[in-house]
């Protein structure tokens, strides 16, 4: 089964292709938030380098957040258009799940963090068991102080942003998911029988609280 993975949850664009044991990934990190310009270019290059045609793709996996809302929409729009044109399934991947998958196997919990505004973080907690990444706590929008005391390994853009406060980060620390990780995560969901309705699929968005309204400092 040939799977294309798409990630635009952060400032950079990543596409990954899994064809059995063959894997190929292309990333564009020269200019942040150039998703609209680069995603089709990367896809064309990926097809040329692998010798495949778009019609060879069986499944598309796309990260749907949390992340930068407008950036996520670019990746999702690309993935939807390609899936509809090819008549193939489209499956979503949570950004935090993919990030946790990229963490090394450790004998402690893993917390994936994606930066939000101010000192807020999108966070979810995981456990690595025999190479499998198991979610222990569902995604939530938390303040830094709510995760700072956790005895865990931290990954993601939020971990990098608050490196000095959190300290326990792998080196190198993944900031956003890779296209290959998204492809692998999507394939795993698909093979387990999970499905998404591409028409209804939207970015995963947790709204920041109205700080002034609630009188929070």
Image (cartoon, rainbow, N blue to C red):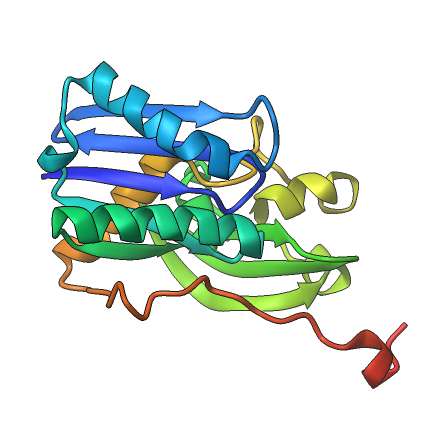
* Residue at figure coordinates x 56%, y 38% from the top left: 175
Residue furthest bottom in the image: 214
Given residues 147 and 108, the one toward you in this image is 147
Answer with left or right where residue 198 lies relative to residue 71.
left
* Residue at figure coordinates x 59%, y 46% from the top left: 154
**What quarter of the picture does the N terminus occupy?**
top left
The answer to whether residue 171 is seen in the rendering is: yes
Q: Is residue 67 above or below residue 46?
A: below
Estimate the x, y position of residue 203 in percent, counting from the top left. 45, 62
* Residue at figure coordinates x 40%, y 65% from the top left: 202
Estimate the x, y position of residue 81 in percent, counting from the top left. 28, 50
Estimate the x, y position of residue 160 in percent, counting from the top left. 67, 39
* Residue at figure coordinates x 76%, y 77% from the top left: 210
Answer with left or right where residue 74 lies relative to residue 201.
right
Given residues 37 and 103, the one toward you in this image is 37
Estimate the x, y position of residue 145 in percent, counting from the top left. 77, 62
Answer with left or right where residue 24 lies relative to residue 154.
left
């Amino acid at each position: 089964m040939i799977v294309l993975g798409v990630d635009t949850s952060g400032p950079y664009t990543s596409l990954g292709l899994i064809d059995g044991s063959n894997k190929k990934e292309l990333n564009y990190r020269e200019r942040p938030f150039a998703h609209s310009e680069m995603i089709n270019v990367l896809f064309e290059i990926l097809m040329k380098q692998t010798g495949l045609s778009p019609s060879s793709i069986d499944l598309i996996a796309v990260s749907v957040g949390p992340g930068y809302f407008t950036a996520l929409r670019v990746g999702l729009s690309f993935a939807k258009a390609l899936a509809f044109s090819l008549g193939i399934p489209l499956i979503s991947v949570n950004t935090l799940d993919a990030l946790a998958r990229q963490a090394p196997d450790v004998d402690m919990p893993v917390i994936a963090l994606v930066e939000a505004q101010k000192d807020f973080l999108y966070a979810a907690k995981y456990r690595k068991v025999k190479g499998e990444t198991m979610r222990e706590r569902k995604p939530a929008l938390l303040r830094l102080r709510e995760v700072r005391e956790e005895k865990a390994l931290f990954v993601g853009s939020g971990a990098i942003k608050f490196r000095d406060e959190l300290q326990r980060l792998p080196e190198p620390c993944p900031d956003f998911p890779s296209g290959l990780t998204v492809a692998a995560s999507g394939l795993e969901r698909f093979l387990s029988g999970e499905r998404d309705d591409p028409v209804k699929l939207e970015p995963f968005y947790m709204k920041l609280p109205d700080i002034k309204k609630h009188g929070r400092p």
